[in-house]
Image: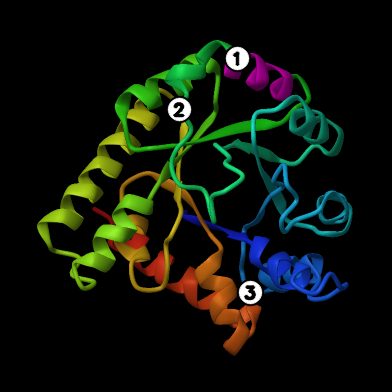
Amino acid sequence: MIELGVNIDHVATLRQARRTWEPDPVWAAVEAHLGGADGITVHLREDRRHIQDEDVRRLRELTQVKLNLEMAATDEMVGIACRLKPEMAMLVPEGRHEVTTEGGLDVVAQEERLKGVVGRLADAGIVTSVFIDAEIAQVEAAARIGARVCEIHTGPYAHAFHNAGRDGESASVLAEIAKIRDAGEAIRGLGMRFNAGHALNYYNVQPIARLAGVRELHIGHAIVSRAVFSGMREAVREMKRLMREAAGQGC
């Protein structure tokens, strides 16, 4: 059954705007769990622009839901992951000047180095995921380095959906869905788990949730934005309802 991982980075973004103690990401994680979240995702960036080291430590110790740590493939981050042991570590590209992650990790270009990173994480008992574009070459490289999960970058799909006036049957949208579907089939064919995420929201999530074999969607900004008005539990509950409804239809 399809699962929802809620990214709570932007709860920390709001807190860091004033450098205070609230809103507390741990509290947000508990509320998300009570709303039906199957997991919590945080991105500990090298510049610590939102989530802090102490947040990750407290999330690991105080919450009862699986933790997905997004991270750059650096020695510092691998060391932190091996010490805290999240259920999953997702390797992502990271740029200091980007507002949010702008594209998938180029596994093909960094295959040997990333194989070593995945090996270190695996030795610590951590499942490794890679955040990649919907390209078969990247999927195949992910399998070669030993990744157990591939999360397909859904940003291009989300932008096409928005630019087409939320017309899910437009040619541009259907083309992006086909790319994700093909990548998902390749992922599953190579024995890895098919996840997806980035820029998904309450309007565009269902065509992705409907894809065969997708295991988890990781969604953050849309849920935190809605939670400002409706509360975290209700925001998570509604997103999961939409996902489960679409997954039940299948395609």
Taking the spot 79% from the left edge, 30% from the top edge, the residue there is 76
Residue 36 horizontal/vertical position (percent):
61, 69
Tag 3 residue? 35
Magenta-tinted stretch = 113-122
Furthest toward the left, the residue is 171
Q: Is residue 116 left or right of residue 164?
A: right
The image's mark for residue 31 is none
Question: Label 1 to label 2, Cα distance in Å?
Answer: 12 Å
Taking the spot 20% from the left edge, 73% from the top edge, the residue there is 165
Tag 2 residue? 106
Furthest toward the front, the residue is 97
Question: Label 1 to label 3, Cα distance in Å?
Answer: 39 Å
108 w.r.t. 61: above or below = above
* Secondary structure under the numbered disc 1 in the rendered image: helix
Q: Is residue 19 left or right of residue 148?
A: right
Residue type indicated by callout 2: Asp
Q: Nearer the viewer, residue 18 or 28?
A: 18
- Residue 119 counted in the magenta span: yes
Q: Would you call the spot at circle 3 few (<14 residues within 10 Å), some (14-19), or many (20 or more)?
A: some
Q: Would you call the spot at circle 2 few (<14 residues within 10 Å), some (14-19), or many (20 or more)?
A: some
- Residue 138 counted in the magenta span: no
Question: Label 3 to label 2, Cα distance in Å?
Answer: 34 Å
Residue type indicated by callout 3: Gly
Residue 55 horizontal/vertical position (percent):
83, 56
